[in-house]
């Protein structure tokens, strides 16, 4: 593959990857009729699940529309739709109907979403936050992030590979963080998850629930210790 083709491929990946999250968030807000509504940690974990298993963006958007159409058709509406999880079954059904024909929407932009200085600040800033905890268990992750931050001018040419590096480091960070939390704290996080997920368990498959639980708990563990998420999606 030529350098130009490789660059085009990476740009398409990065734009499509990050548009997947933002378009779902915006579409759900429009469907709900509340532009200031914020998605919950459970919602973000669900979006990560859909992306990781390859559900097309178009299927997610159709599923959201169909779920809200059914909700509005009800004679009695006991409560507002306050979670993307309400739409999960409709999203799966839309994805199944679309099959191989399902394709993500065309990217809104052909430009890379991040400048080199933005990437440097984000990665070095994440390393600094981890260092600030003073926990020796996190030092190897912080050191790796600092090394990545110093090499951003070269690494920024392949955002997909950079995202893989950051994902691997986040997994190490979560594993180290779990060892510092007591059994009571981990139990409390599990109870919070069960409380949020309980109304929607019947709308998801066992595999979906398992992946969603893992992503939710990973995020909750990091938040409990004031540790940053490392994916480029959280760059702001």
Image (tube, helix red, strand yellow):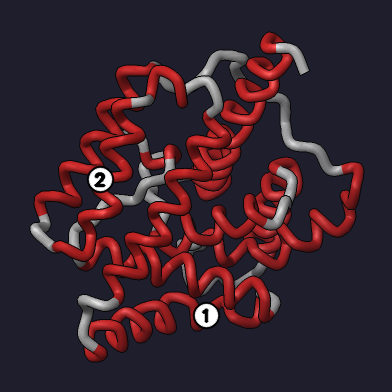
Q: CA distance from mark 1 to mark 2?
A: 41 Å
Which of labels 1 and 2 is toward the front? 2
Q: Quadrant of residue 84?
A: bottom right
Return the residue nearer the eye: 90 or 164: 164
The residue identified by callout 2 is 143
Residue at 46% from the left image edge and 26% from the top image edge: 155
Side (left or right) of 178 relative to 43: left
Q: Tag 1's secondary structure? A: helix
Tell which circle, 1 or 2, labels the residue nearer the N-terminal end.
2
Which of the 4 image quarters holds residue 15?
A: top right
| Position in image of residue 45 (x %, y %) | 49, 60
User: Answer yes or no: do the residues labelled 1 and 2 have beta carbons within 8 Å?
Assistant: no
Residue 97 horizontal/vertical position (percent): 89, 55
Q: Residue at x 52, y 80 (%)?
A: 199
Residue 77, percent from left and from top: 55, 69
Residue 229 vertical position relative to residue 124 in the rendered view, above or below: below
The structure residue drawn at horizontal position 65% and vertical position 64%, both measured from the top left corner, is 88
Q: Note whether residue 68 is visible.
A: no
Left or right of 107 in this view: 41: left
Mark 2 residue crowding within 10 angstroms, few (<14) / some (14–19) / many (20+): some
The residue that disc 1 covers is 199
Residue neighbourhood size for the residue with mark 1, other residues' Cα within 10 Å, grouped as few (<14), some (14–19), many (≥20) = few
Q: How many marks?
A: 2
**Could you tell me residue 63's position as x and y percent?**
71, 54
Residue placed most toward the observer, 128 or 195: 128
């Amino acid at each position: 593959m030529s350098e130009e083709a490789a660059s085009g491929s990476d740009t398409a990946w990065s734009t499509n990857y990050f548009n997947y999250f933002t378009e779902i968030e915006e579409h759900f807000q429009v469907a709900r009729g509340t532009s200031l509504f914020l998605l919950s940690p459970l919602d973000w974990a669900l979006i990560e699940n859909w992306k990781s298993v390859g559900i097309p963006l178009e299927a997610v958007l159709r599923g959201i529309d169909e779920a809200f159409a059914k909700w509005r058709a009800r004679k009695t509406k006991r409560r507002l739709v306050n979670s993307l999880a309400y739409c999960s079954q409709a999203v799966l059904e839309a994805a199944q109907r679309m099959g191989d024909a399902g394709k993500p929407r065309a990217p809104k932009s052909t430009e890379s979403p991040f400048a080199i200085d933005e990437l440097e600040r984000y990665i070095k800033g994440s390393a600094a936050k981890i260092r600030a905890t003073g926990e020796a268990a996190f030092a190897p992750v912080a050191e790796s992030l600092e090394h990545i931050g110093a090499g951003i001018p070269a690494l920024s040419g392949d955002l997909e590979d950079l995202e893989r590096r950051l994902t691997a480091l986040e997994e190490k960070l979560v594993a180290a963080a779990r060892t510092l939390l007591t059994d009571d704290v981990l139990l409390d996080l599990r109870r919070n998850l069960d409380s949020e997920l309980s109304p929607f368990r019947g709308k998801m498959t066992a595999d979906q629930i398992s992946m969603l639980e893992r992503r939710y708990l990973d995020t909750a563990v990091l938040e409990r210790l004031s540790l940053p998420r490392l994916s480029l999606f959280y760059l702001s």
